[in-house]
């Protein structure tokens, strides 16, 4: 890297918008290997389709909870900041408690489904790694 210095070679080359010919040829050569690797990974993970499906389902459910939480926070704040003259203090307290319970249930649902998603993905990952280790060691011992 004598033409542009070490900063050009190690730092600034990552910010160029046009790829050099050398990089383009490496990308073209690696495209074939990437599809082969993804197909092999798919074959290895097909045994875990149920666990992965559950994990994706939990992911989508947690995302739905996460989407609704900001609206629940806003409604809780609106109820909390509403002037007491419009409603009696007891009615306002009851409305605030109802909004707070709704927010707590949404937050708890998000936490539970997010945790279940992590658990399912971790189980699938560990089983896949175990299968890969077994295949590697069996090929080394042959």
Image (cartoon, helix red, strand yellow):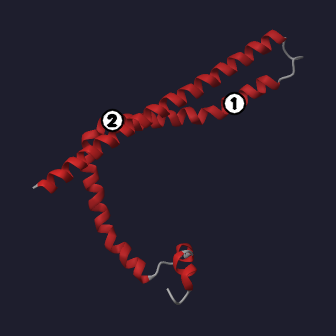
Helix, strand or loop at disc 2?
A: helix
Q: Extreme right residue here?
A: 85
> In this image, 111 relative to 86: left or right?
left
Q: Which residue is mark 2?
A: 51
Which quadrant of the view contains residue 100?
A: top right
Q: Between residue 13 and residue 65, name the one nearer to us.
A: 13
Q: Between residue 9 and residue 84, name the one nearer to us.
A: 9
- Which residue appears at 53% of the width and 90% of the height? 3
* Front disc: 1 or 2: 2
Helix, strand or loop at disc 1?
A: helix
Residue 9 at what x, y percent from top left? 52, 80
Position of 89 relative to 139 (above/below): above
Position of 131 relative to 85 (above/below): below
Position of 26 relative to 67 (above/below): below
Q: Residues within 10 Å of mark 2 (few under 14, many from 20)?
A: some
* Image quarter of the C terminus: bottom left
Residue 57 at what x, y percent from top left? 42, 34
> In this image, 84 relative to 98: left or right?
right
Q: Extreme front residue here?
A: 141
- Which residue appears at 33% of the width and 40% of the height? 124
Position of 141 relative to 32 (above/below): above
Q: Between residue 133 and residue 125, name the one nearer to us.
A: 133
Residue 95 at what x, y percent from top left? 74, 16
Q: Which residue is mark 1?
A: 73
Q: CA distance from mark 1 to mark 2?
A: 33 Å
Q: Between residue 110 and residue 130, name the one nearer to us.
A: 130
Q: Earlier in the sequence, mark 1 or mark 2?
A: 2
Which quadrant of the view contains residue 80?
A: top right
- Which residue appears at 35% of the width and 74% of the height? 28
């Amino acid at each position: 890297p004598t033409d542009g210095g070490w900063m050009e070679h190690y730092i600034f080359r990552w910010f160029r918008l046009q790829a050099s010919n050398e990089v383009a040829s490496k990308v073209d050569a690696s495209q074939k290997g990437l599809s082969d690797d993804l197909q092999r990974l798919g074959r290895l993970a097909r045994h875990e389709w149920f666990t992965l499906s559950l994990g994706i389902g939990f992911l989508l459910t947690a995302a739905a909870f996460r989407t609704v939480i900001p609206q629940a926070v806003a409604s809780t704040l609106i109820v909390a900041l509403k002037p007491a003259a419009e409603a009696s203090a007891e009615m306002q307290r009851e409305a605030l408690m109802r909004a707070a319970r709704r927010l707590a249930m949404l937050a708890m649902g998000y936490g539970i489904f997010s945790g279940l998603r992590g658990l399912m993905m971790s189980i699938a990952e560990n089983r896949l790694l175990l299968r890969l280790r077994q295949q590697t060691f069996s090929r080394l011992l042959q």
